[in-house]
Image (cartoon, grey):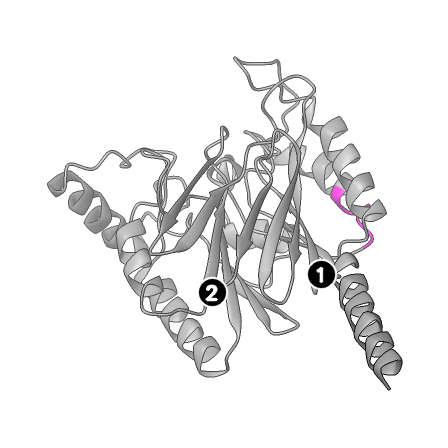
Amino acid sequence: MRKLTHFLTVLAVATSLMAQAQPLKPILRIGLMADIQYADAQTRGSRYYKNSLNKLSDCVADLNKERVQFSLNLGDITDRNPKDLDSVLTILNGLKKTVYNTTGNHDYHGITENKALFKKLGMPAEYYFVKQKGWVFIMLNTNEVASYANVGGTWKEPELKKMLDSISIAKGVNAEEYNGGMSSRQVRWLDSLLAKAQSNHERVMLFSHHPLDFSPGFTALNSREILNVIAKYNCVKAIFAGHHHSGDFGYHSKIPCITLEGMVETPNQNAYGILEIYPNSFELKGRGRTTSRKFLIE
């Protein structure tokens, strides 16, 4: 009997060790990229516009090889000319799985009809969400209210003025022509969506072009208002953004805020990542300049 008990104990310990040694498989694997910012133009400073096509081709090949379930592109797909968009989309269409896009400030250059841009990028709406395996991935549009986003003569124009006035009163540093914000309608939509996700016990990640915190001078025009809404819900587990090409990171009320490095920077070094989500954690596996990070989910 003692021998049998000893054998069963050893077997249990061995089984436990084997289980620990076997890595968990992620629930989801997602490609992430920002600021491709391609242009058929000469290099300016650290921005190698033409080189972005080769970098994007390498990125697409890697994401296909890694069998991501979908990808998220956080804007500034082109730098200045709408005609350059076809060259980028041709490569992005090489992804075997769906890529979900949002716009960046540079994508509006030469655009007079926003809906045409959204349609070309395959966006179902100006802002939208994707649900996968108990997670809600919300694609915000922080370019909705901006000087470059065709708001003149619309209901969004006074909202832009209100945002800029608020920044001036607060002596903020983000009232720049390349920054935009979310309309009151989008903020209410986000509030309602987060309330529903929390009620359904879903977990949420937010994605936008402009950072909502950190990256001084690059944040969305009404980032404080947006963050006040987010703070009401503990279902939000991470906030991702682009726009600030050097990348950034910090915690806002225990929520990790990750600004992705821009692909357009440097002559040859790439910048994108693979987001792996596990039952109780997630990991950003950076490629090239993109910083790798790991987080526990509370």
Task: Report the front residue among 270 and 163.
Answer: 270
Q: How many marks?
A: 2
Q: Nearer the viewer, mark 1 or mark 2?
A: 2
Magenta stretch: helix, strand or loop mostly: loop
Farthest left residue in view: 169
Where residue 26 is drawn, which disc sits there? Answer: 1
Q: Give the quarter of the image for residue 281.
A: bottom right
Q: Element type at marker 1?
A: loop
Above or below: residue 5 compared with residue 183: below
Q: Which residues are magenta?
A: 92-96
On the question of residue 283 being in view, the answer is: yes
**Residue behind mark 2:** 298
**Dots 1 and 2: beta carbons under 8 Å?**
no
Q: Is residue 93 magenta?
A: yes
Q: Position of residue 269 (x, y in %)?
A: 67, 23
- Is the residue marked by circle 2 packed among few (<14), some (14-19), or many (20+) residues within 10 Å? few
Above or below: residue 52 compared with residue 98: above
Residue type at tag 2: Glu
Task: Report the front residue among 180 and 230.
Answer: 230
Residue type at tag 1: Pro
Q: Position of residue 106 (x, y in %)?
A: 50, 35
Mark 1 and mark 2 lie on one chain; the one further toward the N terminus is 1
Residue at image point 51% right, 62% down:
297
From the viewer's perspective, is 183 left or right of 61? left
Residue at image point 56% right, 46% down:
74
Q: Is residue 18 magenta?
A: no
Q: Position of residue 19 (x, y in %)?
A: 78, 65
